Amino acid sequence: MSSTPKHIAIYGKGGIGKSTTTSNISAALAESGRRVIQIGCDPKSDSTVILRGGAELPTVLDSLRDRARPSLEQISTIGFGGVLCIEAGGPVPGVGCAGRGIAAAVDLLDELQVFEKFKPDYVLYDVLGDVVCGGFAVPIRDGIAESAFVVASSDFMAVFAANNLFKAIDKYAATGGARLGGVIANSIQTPYARELLDDFAARTGTEIVGYVPRSQAVAQSELYGQTVIEAQPYSEQAEIYRALARRVVGDHETRLPRPLNGPELKDWARSWGDRIFGVERDANNEARL
Amino acid sequence: MSRPLVGFHDGCALHGALATVAAIEGVTPLVHSTPGCALRGAFATAGAQGFRGAPIHLSPISSTNLAEKHIVFGGASRLREQIKNTLSVLPRGLLVVITGCPTEMIGDDVPAMVREAVTQGESVIDVGAAGFLGSAHGGYERVLAALAARVDELRLPAAPAAPGLVNIFGVVPRYDETWASDLDEISRLLAAVGLVANPIFGPGGGLSSLAALPKAVASLVLSPWGLAPAEALKAKAGVPIVAVEGLPVGADAVQDLLRRLAAATSLIDDAAVERLLISERRFEDFALDETLLALSRLGRRRVAIAGNSVIAGPIARFLVTNLGWDGRALVLTDEPTGDSGLSAFAGRVISTADGAAVKAAIRDAEPDFLIAGARYGALAGELAIPFAPIADLGGRAALSGGFTGARGVARLLAALTAAQTPVVETKRAAARA
C-alpha cells in the first residue's frame, strides 16, 4: 500500500445505518489485511461499538475536559481485525457545541500524530448527518478526507440530508475539499426504494456505489455487538459489505454533485409520492375488485 | 462589494453593555465569554481613545474566560462558579452577567444559572449582549431595557420617595464622550424647576437610582437608544415618556424640553421655569456677545458635523437656527434607526459608524468648517478648513465638556471661535526640506 493513508468520510442522517455500514466496511478492509482507523464524529460516541464488542472507550473530547494531553492509547482501542477505533465524543444533548467538538477532536488527532504513528492504509470518518454547521463539515474540508460518501435510504429525510451534504461538498470543493464518491443505498426493502435513489442520484449527477438490503444478519450481529463480517462471515450480507468496501476504497471517479434547490427537491419528492402511492392505490383498488 | 471598516466609531454590543454597567456605582459586570471580550471591553470602557496597545495581563473585569472545553461541553457550570467567586469578592450590590458571542452561539442556559443565584438570595441579572447583536449603543439599550423591565426582581434596597423624579435615558456612558457633564447639566436644569433627575450613571446615580426607576414621574429620552428602557417602564409602572431629539443645546432647546416635560407631569413650577429660562438666555446672550467679533469674522459657514446623534443633531440645529450657518452635512456616527427629523438642519443626513464613510460624506459636502471628533483633524487640514473638535478629547471631556443648555452653548462658541485650520504635517515637512 502507499505510505499516505486514504481518508474517506461517510455521512448520513441519524439512524440511517452509517455506523453499521462504516464499521462493516472497516471490518471488511481489516479482514483483507489493511490497516484501518475508524473515527466516529458524532457526540453519541457509538460509531465503533460493533467493532470493539461494546468495550468502553474514552472519547477524544473527554480528554479536553481535564485539559490534559492524552496519549493515543488513552483515546483509542483496537477492535476487530486490528481496526483502530476512535470516538470524537461531544457534549450531552442540549448543551455546548458538538460542531466545535468535531473540529477540536480532529485538531487534537492531528497534534497527537495519530496517522503518522499508526500508519493506516485507510481512515474512515463516520460523521453525523445533516452538515448543520461548519463543525460537521470539518472532515470534508481541505486536507482531511479526499472523498465523501453518503448513506441514504428511500426515506425523504435521508435524501434531504444527502442533498445537504452535496451542498457542503460543492461549497468546499473549490478550496480543496473532499469530492463526492457516491451514495450508499441502505435498508433497501421495497421495490420502489432502489428506483427512487437511482433517480435522485441521476438528478444530482452522482451514482449509487452499493445497494445494501435490509437484513436480519445485521440486526442479529448488532445484538451480539459485532459486525456482520465478524459474526456471519459467510453470509450473503457479508459479501455485500465486502463488495461495498472494495468500491469505496477503490479508484473511482469522484465528482461534484448538483444538489437540488428547495423547490426542486419538493417537486421531486411530490412526483415520487404520486408514483408510490399511486401504485399502492391501484393495488388496493384491484384488491377491492 | 464589501470592504473593511476603517476607524469604526462604535464598539460592539458587549462593550457598550460593559461601559453601561461599569458606570453605575454598586453594580458589577461579569462577562460570560472568552478572555478577549472582557480584555478588549476594558480598553473600550477607557473611552474612545482608550486603546494604547496590548497589556501584559488580563483585565480586572470579572470574566468566565472560557476555554475550548467550555465551548464544546457548555459553559454554564463555569458561569455558576464565576458568579459565586465574584460575589465572594464583591458581596454587595448588583451583579450583571453580560453574555458574549460564543455563549450566545452555543446557547448556554444563562438564565438558569442566574435564577439559581437569585434563589440563594443574591442580586443577579443577565443581559444578552453578544457583539453580533449590534453596536455599543445597542448594548446600552439592552442593559437598561433589561434593568427597567426586571427591576422588581433585583432585590435592591427600597428607593426613598422622590417626588418629581425624572429618569434620564439615551446618553451612553463613555461612548457619548461628554456623558458625565451632560448628565450633570441636565440634572442642574431639572433641579431648577423643582424636578429631581435620575441620571443612573455617575455621582448622581448608583444602585439606588435603579430601584427608583419605576417611581419616576417621567422618563426623559434624549436619543433613540433610550426609548426601549423608557417603554419598559411605561408598560410596567405607567411612567410617561418625554422624548426629545438629543441634548438641549441652547436656551431655546431647554425651553422646548421643559415645555414637553410640563405637559407630561404636573409637578413643574411655572414661575421657576420662567426664572430658569431668563437666566439661561442671559447666559447664552452674554456668551454670544463675548464671542460676537470672532463669530462675525468667521461669518456664515458651510458646516459639516459628525458625531453621535445625542449631540451632533442638536449642535446642527443650534448653528442653523441661532447662528444662521449653512448645514451641509450631518453624520450620525452612532447609526440611530428611524427618521432623525434633522434634514431641515443639514443638506444631507448620513448615518454611519464607518470612519471612511464619515470622511467621504464630509468631503462630498464641500464644507468650509468642520465640527467632528479630533481624529478628523487631519482631514480638515487636507481640506484646509477650520476645525472644532467635539469628541476624541480624552477623559476631560466627560468631566468638563458637554454642550447642554446655555453653558453648553458657551463651550460650543468657545470651540468655534478657537477653531484653527490644522496644518498637514507632511506638507510642512516637505516645505522645510
Image (cartoon, coloured by chain):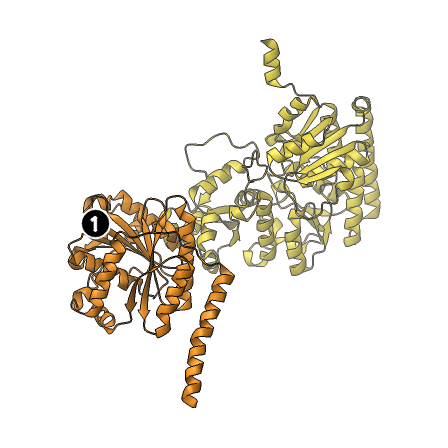
Chain colours: A orange, B yellow
Q: Nearer the viewer, residue B79 or A224?
A: A224
Where residue B154 sits, quadrant-wise, is: bottom right
Q: Nearer the viewer, residue A6 or A54?
A: A6
The structure residue drawn at horizontal position 78% and vertical position 52%, both measured from the top left corner, is: B267
Q: Is residue A46 left or right of residue B175?
A: left
Q: Residues within 10 Å of mark 1 (few under 14, many from 20)?
A: many
Q: Quadrant of the N terminus of chain B?
A: top right
Q: Nearer the viewer, residue B31 or B4?
A: B4
Q: Is residue A131 visible?
A: no
Secondary structure beneath dot 1 equals loop
Where residue A223 sits, quadrant-wise, is: bottom left
Where residue B46 appears, as percent x and y from the top left, is 54, 35
The structure residue drawn at horizontal position 60% and vertical position 18%, both measured from the top left corner, is: B425
- Residue B183 higher or lower than B289, as above or below: below
Q: Nearer the viewer, residue A280 or B415?
A: A280
Total labels drawn: 1
Where residue A22 appears, as percent x and y from the top left, is 27, 60
What residue is disc 1 on?
A121
Q: Is residue B55 left or right of residue A28?
A: right
Where residue B388 appears, as percent x and y from the top left, is 69, 27
Where residue B428 appears, as percent x and y from the top left, is 62, 14
Which chain does the residue under circle 1 lie in?
A
Q: Residue furthest bottom?
A: A289
**Which kind of residue does numbered mark 1 sit on?**
Asp
Q: Is residue B96 visible?
A: yes
Q: Quadrant of the C terminus of chain B?
A: top right
The structure residue drawn at horizontal position 40% and vertical position 48%, both measured from the top left corner, is: A172
- Residue B289 higher or lower than B14, as above or below: above
Q: Is residue A191 left or right of residue B414?
A: left
